[in-house]
Image (cartoon, helix red, strand yellow):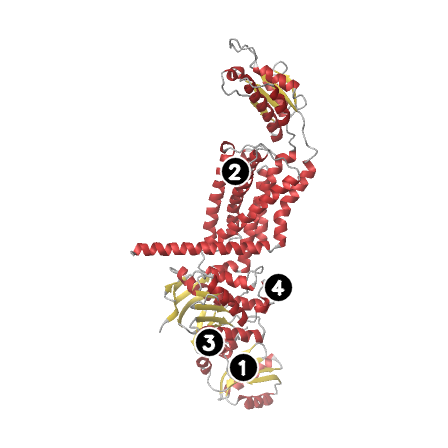
């Protein structure tokens, strides 16, 4: 055996030993965590309390049944298609006015308002949306291309979701109709898809994210307790690397986050939150787990900086509260600052999957990558700081 | 002579505080080596450095043949540390606490399972072995604290005041336990400010004060330096009277040394001292409130060297 073979074998042996240490440290963390009733109650109790409060406040009373919109139809001119008897934009408006009059109220068109006036109405929330049908709408359907409709809505995710969903259903059905499918199918499908999404439904995915967000304080508290009791120092006299001590804390929190996610999703079902029929249950678990990883990255940063449980508990809320509110977990808003708040990505991905039933990489891929990026960078910084052995707060 | 620990001008400063100020040690393998000194003398800081927890400010140290700065991971594999404070996971049982340290040292379950129960039995803890540590008394916790340092049978064990706060009976159990470990060829470092503990257990010891070694030797050698004669300690009625009689006692040719202790106490070493002292007291009409006579202790050595008691 060469010298380098021997070194490689030693390295491999050390690595196996570290994995063995990591396993036992994680088991230890889980045992100590699950034997602390107060901590368990807090982990589930806090997000559950939010669910109860918001379901009581918004679960029943804020249900919207109809939306006002102004419609600009630029497709009404002669499309110039020879032998084409139908103008599909008129068909769309006809369906909206007759079949969906309970849900959609077209309060005006270009005959009544200019675009500037319509935007002003939108800004003062006199209407919920402005719909623009472009001049080539019929032409595109006729030639088998993808037609476009542009919608501008108030910053209300429910309105956006419902109006988008209704228009998409109608246009899809017009395309089907154009290709010779039985038109009677259109009406019944439209009725089924007119979902009454409440305010509570739209923010429900945020409660799962909010529950997992508590990982930040849990990890920081865990290591503050280890520092205060001297157990971290005691472990430092054994051969286990300090980074593995940190990883064990993260793993145990991830395991807790997994169970927390399952319990919270069940609670949401019990409280009647809306789950889209196409919602992918694996993604509903995976997204909170990815966000738990991101939160734990911030938790490691905090854990490396604090010495006492009191400081850890207080400082954690300086991260958790802005993350909750600026991430739009409890109410929807648009602001450039949201780009810097990881909760907004997690909440967006959860809403896409849970409320809108969109499970594609195009819809949530960017969110996932950003969460991994946030988590990776903060964990790396946390490990570097944690290796220093001395806390500064 | 094989050395377990060798240090050269080892220092640790915390800002302006010189916690350890240039310590040179040579601890033979297999010995039970004591660090005796008052609180704040630098004993724990020295142990923290030698057990790789705290990096030295300067100086060199070699532990079991490994360089302290460059090979700390190898050192960690060979040492066990019993910290001064009780350091346990309160929501684990005694058995789980001990197993954890064994696991961190890479021991297999078959190796540590029986050994743990054997050690718990020797410390009279088997009947509460499945209870969470948070339900234990202080004495029981301290015994578990000791066991966590030895489960992996390390070559070098640091006991930092292992019997602090224990009742005399439990203290004796821990002392016997430590002596047993020395018989297994482990090198043991014991810090204490209990002179009886240092005297009873140590093969050799250093007395440390203000971060410096002030003397070193076997307990009997150190006590022998004070010479033959009794140690007499007495208390006078008023502080001003003490100043009157100290010069008179110093003039007596059988008295080797006299130290004032506290406000009204006097400690002296001399042959047949008791008889002569009472005569002086009668002559100057100073009232003696209490008096004791005993053999030399390590505390007297410390007082002789520093003028202070270990617990001052």
Co-location on one chain, circles 3 and 2? no
Q: Rounded to the nearest whole Å, what is the CA distance between mark 4 and mark 1?
A: 45 Å
Q: Name the residue under label 2.
A: A340
In the rendered view, tell whether residue A298 sits above or below residue A128: below
Mark 4 vs mark 3: which is more N-terminal?
A: 4
Co-location on one chain, circles 1 and 3? yes
User: Badges 2 and 1: C-beta atoms under 8 Å apart?
Assistant: no
Report the quarter where the N terminus of chain A lies.
Answer: bottom left
Q: Mark 1 points at which residue?
A: B267
Q: Rounded to the nearest whole Å, what is the CA distance between mark 1 and mark 3?
A: 26 Å
Element on which disc 1 rests: strand
User: Badges 4 and 3: C-beta atoms under 8 Å apart?
Assistant: no
Q: Which chain does the residue under circle 3 lie in?
A: B
Q: Viewer-nearest of labels 4 and 3?
A: 4
Q: Mark 4 points at which residue?
A: B135
Q: Which chain does the residue under circle 4 lie in?
A: B
User: Badges 1 and 3: C-beta atoms under 8 Å apart?
Assistant: no
Q: Rounded to the nearest whole Å, what is the CA distance between mark 3 and mark 2?
A: 62 Å
User: Badges 4 and 2: C-beta atoms under 8 Å apart?
Assistant: no
Q: Rounded to the nearest whole Å, what is the CA distance between mark 2 and mark 1?
A: 72 Å
Q: Rounded to the nearest whole Å, what is the CA distance between mark 4 and mark 2?
A: 47 Å
Element on which disc 3 rests: loop
Q: Which chain does the residue under circle 2 lie in?
A: A
- Residue B202 is tagged as 3
What x and y, as percent, mark residue A215? Answer: 56, 47
Residue ID at (50%, 73%): B177
Element on which disc 4 rests: helix
Q: Rounded to the nearest whole Å, what is the CA distance between mark 4 and mark 3?
A: 33 Å
């Amino acid at each position: 055996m060469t010298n380098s073979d021997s070194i490689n074998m030693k390295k491999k042996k050390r690595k196996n030993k570290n994995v063995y240490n990591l396993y036992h440290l994680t088991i230890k963390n889980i045992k100590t965590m699950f034997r602390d009733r107060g901590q368990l109650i807090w982990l589930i109790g806090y997000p559950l309390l939010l669910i109860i409060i918001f379901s009581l406040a918004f679960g029943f009373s804020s249900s919207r049944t109809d939306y006002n919109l102004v419609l600009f139809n630029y497709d009404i001119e002669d499309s110039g298609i020879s032998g084409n008897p139908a103008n599909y934009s008129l068909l769309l408006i006809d369906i909206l006015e007759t079949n969906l009059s309970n849900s959609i109220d077209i309060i005006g068109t270009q005959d009544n308002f200019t675009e500037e006036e319509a935007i002003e109405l939108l800004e003062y929330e006199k209407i919920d949306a402005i719909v623009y049908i472009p001049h080539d709408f019929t032409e595109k359907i006729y030639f088998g291309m993808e037609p476009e409709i542009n919608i501008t809505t108030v910053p209300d995710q429910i309105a956006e979701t419902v109006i988008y969903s209704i228009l998409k259903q109608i246009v899809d059905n017009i395309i089907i109709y154009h290709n010779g499918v039985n038109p009677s199918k259109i009406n019944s499908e439209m009725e089924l898809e007119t979902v009454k999404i409440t305010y509570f439904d739209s923010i429900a995915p945020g409660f799962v994210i909010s529950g997992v967000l508590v990982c930040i304080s849990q990890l920081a508290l865990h290591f503050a307790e280890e520092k205060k009791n001297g157990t971290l120092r005691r472990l430092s006299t054994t051969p286990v690397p300090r980074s593995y001590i940190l990883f064990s804390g993260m793993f145990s929190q991830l395991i807790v986050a997994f169970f927390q996610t399952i319990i919270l999703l069940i609670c949401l079902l019990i409280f009647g939150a809306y789950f889209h029929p196409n919602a992918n249950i694996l993604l509903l678990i995976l997204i909170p787990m990815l966000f738990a990883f991101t939160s734990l990255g911030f938790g490691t940063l905090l854990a490396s900086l604090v010495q006492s449980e009191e400081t850890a508990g207080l400082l954690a809320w300086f991260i958790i509260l802005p993350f909750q509110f600026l991430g739009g977990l409890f109410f929807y808003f648009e602001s450039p600052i949201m780009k810097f708040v990881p909760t907004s990505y997690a909440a967006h991905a959860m809403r896409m999957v849970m409320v809108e039933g969109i499970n594609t990489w195009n819809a949530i891929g960017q969110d996932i990558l950003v969460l991994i990026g946030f988590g990776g960078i903060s964990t790396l910084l946390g490990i570097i700081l944690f290796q220093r052995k001395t806390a500064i707060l | 002579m094989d050395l377990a620990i060798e240090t050269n001008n080892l220092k640790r400063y915390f800002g302006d505080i010189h916690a350890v100020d240039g310590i040179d040690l040579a601890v033979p393998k297999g010995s039970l080596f004591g660090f005796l000194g008052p609180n704040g003398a630098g004993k724990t800081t020295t142990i923290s450095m030698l057990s790789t927890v705290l990096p030295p400010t300067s100086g060199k140290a070699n532990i079991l043949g490994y360089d302290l700065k460059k090979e700390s991971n190898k050192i960690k594999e060979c040492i066990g540390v019993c910290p001064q404070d009780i350091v346990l996971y309160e929501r684990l049982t005694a058995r789980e606490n001990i197993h954890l340290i064994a696991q961190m040292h890479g021991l297999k379950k078959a190796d540590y399972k029986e050994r743990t129960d054997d050690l718990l039995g020797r410390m009279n803890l088997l009947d509460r072995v499945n209870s969470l540590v948070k339900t234990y008394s202080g004495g029981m916790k301290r015994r578990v604290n000791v066991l966590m340092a030895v489960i992996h049978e390390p070559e070098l064990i640091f006991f930092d005041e292992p019997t602090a706060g224990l009742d005399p009976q439990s203290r004796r159990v821990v002392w016997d336990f430590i002596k047993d470990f020395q018989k297994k060829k482990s090198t043991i470092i014991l810090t204490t400010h209990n002179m009886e503990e240092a005297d009873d257990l140590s093969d050799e010891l250093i007395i440390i004060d203000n971060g410096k070694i002030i003397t070193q030797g076997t307990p009997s050698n150190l006590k022998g330096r004070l010479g033959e004669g009794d140690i007499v300690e007495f208390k006078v009625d008023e502080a001003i009277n003490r100043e009157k009689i100290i010069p008179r006692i110093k003039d007596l040719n059988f008295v080797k040394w006299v130290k004032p202790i506290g406000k009204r106490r006097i400690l002296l070493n001399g042959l047949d001292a008791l008889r002569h002292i009472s005569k002086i007291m009668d002559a100057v009409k100073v009232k003696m409130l209490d008096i004791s006579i005993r053999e030399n202790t390590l505390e007297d050595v410390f007082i002789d060297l520093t003028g202070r008691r270990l617990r001052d």
